[in-house]
Amino acid sequence: MKKIFTIGMLLILSINYIQAQTASIISGKIIDQQTLEPIVGAVISNLEGNLGTVSDINGNFNLEADMQTLKISNIGYEAQEVSASSSVVVKLKPSMENLQTVIVTANREASLRTSAPIAISKLSSKVIDETKATSLYELVNKTPGVLMVNLGNEQHSMAIRQPMTTNAYYLYLEDGLPIRPLGVFNHNALLEINQFTLSSVEVVKGPVSSIYGAEAIGGAVNLIGQRPTAVPSAKVGIQFDQFGYKRLQFGTGMMTGKKFGFYIGGVISQQKDGWITSSDYDKTNITARFEYQINDKSRLTFSNAYGKYYSQTSGSVDSVAFIAGNT
């Protein structure tokens, strides 16, 4: 009898051990297909949706389960089904239809557009990439109700739901911080921006002084920089035309381990001997961003920017000089 009992117990333990071995650990990373930035809070589950987890601040996840297929979903992205493996990297594609129902503010928290007390438009990384703008005004002008006037050589005036002006009615921010200090005239502030390292652009239309301060009486333009990419990446681009314009742009980034990451990008552009008189300019912008993951909820960000800008400015011609041909 004891022998039979012992054999039975061994069989039960063996079955439990075999069942325990079938539950493998699935780990991976969820990233944005366009920017390669990690996606925080993506839902990783089985097809039934009754078992799963979410990605952390670096896009990583671990799931102990026995399943053949994973379902990945997140607000603003198209859901995907992928084969489960011990290590998987999933690139989610932004969903333009879903993006119309949410806004992403400078603190990178998603909320319903219908619950926002102000009018906010967001230009995604996909729009930025497809526009291939030579100047920032070509990108910002894709926002309804906004007209960023090109004054030549990346100099500009702005109109957000009101007449064009060079007055300091608008606040320009980079990652939620003012580009220029309070009290300093911020006209032409956007020419200091390295547009090649932008992940998205937010435009707040209308008075928002209660949120952003006195300089935002007409609206605000917030430029969100590129975070370190979840996987090693590098890109380079060259643009030029027959009117003396040429530009070199580059970018590279990665996460080195679980805690530290960086992204470095730059643009060197030049206009020389163009068809417009006094239109020469030379611009160099290089931005380096470093991030250190303190814990699951906090990270330390250090950003350093170098900028050099030179521009000619067109003058005016009076009637006497024009008639005399002295232009």
Image (cartoon, grey):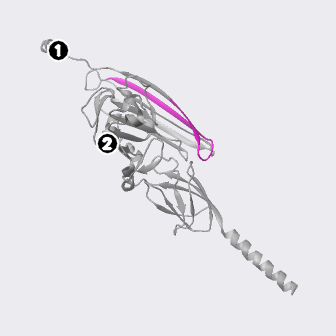
- Measure the C-alpha gap from mark 1 to mark 2: 37 Å
For label 1, the crowd category at 10 Å Cα-Cα, with few meaning under 14, some 14 to 19 and many 20 or more, is: few
| Image quadrant in which the C terminus is located | top left
> Seen from this angle, which residue lies furthest front?
210
> In terms of secondary structure, where does tag 2 sit?
loop
User: How many circles with numbers are drawn on the protein?
Assistant: 2
| Amino acid type, residue under disc 2 in the picture | Thr
- State yes or no: residue 295 in magenta: yes
The quadrant where residue 88 appears: bottom right
Kindly identify the residue that appears in the image at 42 percent across and 25 percent down: 182
- State yes or no: residue 7 in magenta: no
Q: Name the residue nearer the viewer: 185 or 66.
A: 185
Residue 240 appears in the figure: no
Q: Is residue 312 above or below residue 91?
A: above
Dominant secondary-structure state across the stretch colored magenta: strand
Pinpoint residue 59: horizontal percent, then vertical percent. 55, 51
Kindly identify the residue that appears in the image at 25 percent across and 17 percent down: 315
* CB atoms of marks 1 and 2 within 8 Å: no
Kindly identify the residue that appears in the image at 76 percent across and 75 percent down: 14
| Amino acid type, residue under disc 1 in the picture | Asp
What is the span of residues highlighted in magenta in the rendered image? 280-304
Tell me the residue that label 1 is attached to: 318
Q: Name the residue nearer the viewer: 129 or 11.
A: 11
Mark drawn on residue 143: 2
